[in-house]
Image (cartoon, helix red, strand yellow):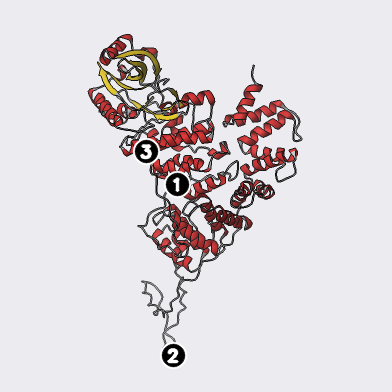
Amino acid sequence: MMCGSQTPQAIDKHTGETKTYSSSDRLPSQDKARLQRSLGGNYELGKLIGRGGFAEVFLVHDKRLKRDLALKALRPDLMLSDQLLTRFRREAETVAALRHPHIVPIYDIGEADGIAYILMPLIQGESLRALLLREGPRPPREAGRILLEAADALEAAHEAGVVHRDIKPENIMLEGKGRRVQLMDFGIAKAIDTSDATPGLTSTGMLVGTPHYMSPEQAAGDTHLDHRSDQYSLAVVGFQMITGSLPFDGESTRAVLFQQMVGVPKSLRDLVPDVPVPLAFAVDRALAKEPKERFPSMAAFAEAMAGPDAMPLGSPVVEAPAAVSPTPTVIQDRPAPTRPRARWLPWAGLGAFGIAVAAFLLTRNGPPAPQPAASAPVAPATVTPVPPGPGPTTTSVPPPPLPKPLVAGAKVPAKRADGAAPTTTAKPEQPVASLTCQTAITGRKWTDAVRLCAAEGDRGSATSSRALATLYQKGTGVDRSDSAAATWFRKASSAGDAQSAFRLGVMYATGVGVTQNDVEATALIRKAADAGVEDAWPLIAERFEQGLGTKRSDQDAATWYRKAAESGNKASQYNLGEMFSRGRGVEKSEQEAAKWFSKAAEQGHPGAQYQFGMMYIRGRGGLAKDEEVGLQWLDRAAAQGHEDAKKEVAKRRRP
């Protein structure tokens, strides 16, 4: 049965705290009688089945059609003005026009002496919130399915011009045994969030919304929210479903709102190592602080979650011909888009996370723009970039220097005895530095950068080719094009640039800008790994472990995991610990397993914290048995949502 999802919370704009209501704010019996009279004789108003900050939900029996319905009545103390009631009716009419299998329909709306209500189906199921409270985090596959169905519903609403504004687990109903998503409460937040005097506030001076799920722009009080605000809120729900925790929390509502605006969430992969590649990428990008950094639509969000092999909602990416250098479509000079500082995430783990992170960093944050050759930050220390090729040379005879004007008081050189003009030693003029691909990028002259990088790349410069590929990926100075980026990465890779080989390999692995090809991806990533590109080490290990584009080999996987683990990659440290504990690809050794679990646990890997804690509890791996220390590690893992750790802690601390 639908237990009545909560309607939007009220937040005091001045104090930043959530408004709470006492029992006296609820519908008194006389108001219920007014509701019954308004419903007429064909409906019987039943018991209260749910309540929230702004409404109460009652069971209603339809006598004619012999069915149970739900009635959501807004609280009468909201001071419902004629304007608000008109707005409420208009929003309800808009939502009632929506026809979608994942949106709860509206059967009727009404008003009984100042009490506005909505009549809708009674969903046989429960809310996502109730499911999470009872069973905890959802398996990534189930979480992805719920997100896809919700995104599909929101895309339909957004196309009709409806923004939900209050996406949260309470408003996501799960119907029947299959837990089919049913989104509800469309339009209610917008209907309530209005005032004649102050846009964005209710008549009681309250900002409408649920702090933990608000987008940054909503938390900042922006009254002009669009579809990207719903995308952010749905990503928060996805983060919570997968990890068991919210990306942002605080001791007060004000603290939560502040975190929504400035905080950086932990990566899904750090918290749940086996989260699928596309899902991790999609949720991470949808949680961007700036709306323009998120997906352009819910359809694009859904495509990203479904992955490169399942793209029913958009057009496929067509690869540019490899043999032809794309002619850059130069747009007006502009500053590079400001993006959040990328936090490097571990590549490897249970599943293909390495590919996800690579795709995320390449398409969302992108690498930094190339710098002058003196510092060359675009190329790692282990790769020697090919210097830019020489530009065209011209020979000309400079005109003779003009005589310098005399300055008052200056000493005039005396004439020579032979009558010749006095000789002076002219200081050599400083050469004017010519503009190159690198210097144009440093000076943020994007039009020149695109032109020069293309010319230098065509002459064989790997560094310039890679720089232009980066500009295409970021859409800086040119129209963004993954296929063009792939073409220029291919040029740079062919010229010997290992970093470009790695990035092109990631594109082949994910199908971004090129047709997905595991064999080509593995060959390029292996080339980069052999050349010393550290980012490629955990990814090639994962491909050997899973047999992606190459013959499966635990021995090769362990070799590359060790290299990555020794460089500090915590996911690789965890994976290497797993291999030692099971004797896969290496000789079984509990001592070595404990060593690598310890290193990953210290860096905050929840799986490693669980394994290391259990080794202490059992006295394995050369560790002295110590249940207290073991439980401390289990507590850390449980705090990050590790299910086995939570069960173990509950079992061992059960009174």
Residue 478, percent from left and from top:
39, 57
- The secondary structure type at the circle numbered 2 is loop
- Frontmost of labels 3 and 2 is 3
Q: Which residue is mark 1?
A: 339
- The secondary structure type at the circle numbered 1 is loop
- Outermost residue toward the bottom in this view: 418
Q: Label 2 amino acid?
A: Asp
Quadrant of the rendered image containing residue 17: top left
Along the line of sight, which residue is nearer the eye, 519 or 558? Answer: 519
- The secondary structure type at the circle numbered 3 is helix
Along the line of sight, which residue is nearer the eye, 238 or 435? Answer: 238
Residue 514 is marked as: none
Look at the picture and state if 253 lies above or below 365. Answer: above
Q: Earlier in the sequence, mark 3 or mark 1?
A: 3
Does the rendering let one see residue 525? yes
- State left or right for residue 191 relative to residue 504: left
Q: Residues within 10 Å of mark 2 (few under 14, many from 20)?
A: few
Q: Label 3 amino acid?
A: Glu
Q: Label 1 amino acid?
A: Arg
Q: Quadrant of the N terminus?
A: top left
Along the line of sight, which residue is nearer the eye, 177 or 209? Answer: 177
Along the line of sight, which residue is nearer the eye, 288 or 60? Answer: 60
